[in-house]
Image (cartoon, rainbow, N blue to C red):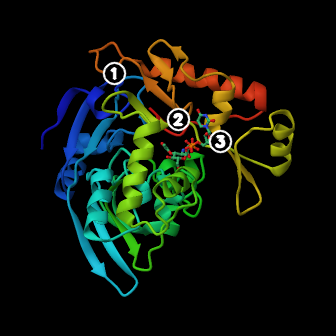
Amino acid sequence: MLVEKNVPLQAFNTFGIVARAQALVRIADEPALRAVLADPELAASPKFVLGGGSNIVLTGDLKALVLKVEIPGRRLVQETHKAYIVEAGAGENWHEFVRWTVAQGWPGLENLALIPGTVGAAPVQNIGAYGVELQDVFDSLDAMDLRTGQVFTLNAAQCAFGYRDSVFKHRSAAEGSGAGHLALGLKDRALILRVRLALAKDWKPVLGYADLERKRLETQCDAPSAQQIYDWVCAIRRAKLPDPAVIGNAGSFFKNPTVTPEQCADIIARDPKVVHYLLDDGSVKLAAGWLIDSCGWKGKSVGQAGVYEKQALVLVNRGTGIDGQGATGGEVMTLAKAIQTSVYERFGILLEPEPVVV
Ligand code: EPU
């Protein structure tokens, strides 16, 4: 087993923030992880599981042992009369996996095309886009308990999925943060090895989102295939979201907040144009991007950290590519806090960051 020391992490986080890991082990398979857990010193050290690094903000060097997940593999596990059950190793690139399933003729993931990151990270924050969330297509996952080395399987209910949330984002209840269905939160306690998705054979396109409706009208295509939707989603994302390979970012930086109908009515009375969506449970979701935009943040910066010009919900690293000159995690968080304050002062809403701040 190779323990790499003092490893630069700039290439391992999509924000492109400069930081180092004191120690890093690449996990390409289950035996590699077992070897870590069998080593008394490594087993005892705190651990940080790193996937594609697309949803983290590094605010300093990592002292915990970094487990960089590189488990490969994708296969059709089972075909039932209802669905294709497809499995991928946690280290697979999510978008490549989506592309492969669509090309195989197994539809269902097309709305989730071009989301950066790995398959193993997808359940952690229950990735979602254009009306589909991972939980809608989720079958089960296998993970290893980092304390005992035991491999266990979780179904969707056990993952306690929520909006950009799961059991993997919470510490155990005893440690103070609650974890939905499970008394135990699994943050830093488990490493996801494989994920299985159930892609239904009675597939229907999910087209409700305005951007997709626009594409449908433009192309006058009333019954698009999964491949067609995949192409549309890729085009939409390329037009409004920065490519992390070119401009460092971690996707949406804040969650879209949920408010009561009364709170929403209050805001509408002052700002009639506020973008909002009614949810099934009667509450109302507000577009955080609109709130931030209307506070005038588009294009503003703190040091090298900035608000993306085309989508105010995305914070970017304006210094990516210039060795050592990019945004620091501190600049990103200072900018994020300033945005939170101004949105709070104007709308009375405290925006919650989406990425994990380390
Ligand atoms: N808007 C503005 N100004 C802005 C940004 C947005 O007025 O600067 C308005 C838009 O015009 C639109 C509304 O806000 O009316 C919503 O914007 P958009 O459709 O771009 O979606 P979003 O709510 O900002 C969410 C997800 C994205 C996902 C898209 C599409 C969250 C936090 N973000 O963004 O997910 O791709 O919907 O489903 O839920 C991510 O999580 O990293 C991510 C990119």
Could you tell whether 154 is left or right of 312 in the image?
left
Instruction: Please give the name of the residue rendered at 33% of the width and 54% of the height, measured from the top-left corner.
Output: 119
Q: Residue 242 location, x and y as percent?
A: 41, 33
Q: Residue 71 location, x and y as percent?
A: 22, 54
Which residue is nearer to you in this view: 206 or 337? 206
Q: Callout 3 environment at 10 Å: few (<14), some (14 to 19), or many (20+)? A: some
Instruction: Please give the name of the residue rendered at 20% of the width and 60% of the height, measured from the top-left corner.
Output: 73
Q: For the residue marked with disc 2, what is the amino acid? A: Phe
Task: Find numbered disc 1 in the image and state the secondary structure of the residue it sits on.
Answer: loop
Q: Residue 124 location, x and y as percent?
A: 44, 52
Q: Is residue 351 visible?
A: no
Tell which quarter ligand 1 is in: top right
Task: Find numbered disc 3 in the image and state the secondary structure of the residue it sits on.
Answer: loop
What is the CA distance from the residue labelled 2 to the residue labelled 1? 17 Å
What is the CA distance from the residue labelled 3 to the residue labelled 1? 27 Å
Give the quadrant of the C terminus. top left
Q: Residue 277 location, x and y as percent?
A: 70, 52
Q: For the residue marked with disc 1, what is the amino acid? A: Thr
Instruction: Please give the name of the residue rendered at 42% of the width and 35% of the height, measured from the top-left corner.
Output: 56
Which one is earlier in the sequence, the residue at label 2 or at label 3?
2
- Mark 3 = which residue? 287
Q: Is residue 347 visible?
A: yes
Which residue is nearer to you in this view: 32 or 247? 247
Q: Callout 1 environment at 10 Å: few (<14), some (14 to 19), or many (20+)? A: many
Instruction: Please give the name of the residue rendered at 49% of the width and 48% of the height, measured from the top-left corner.
Output: 169
- Mark 1 = which residue? 320
Which one is earlier in the sequence, the residue at label 2 or at label 1?
2
Give the quadrant of the N terminus. top left
Work out whether 213 lies above or below 246: below
Q: For the residue marked with disc 3, what is the amino acid? A: Ala
Q: Which mark is residue 253?
A: 2
Q: Establish whether ligand 1 lies closer than 8 Å to the Cβ of label 3.
A: yes
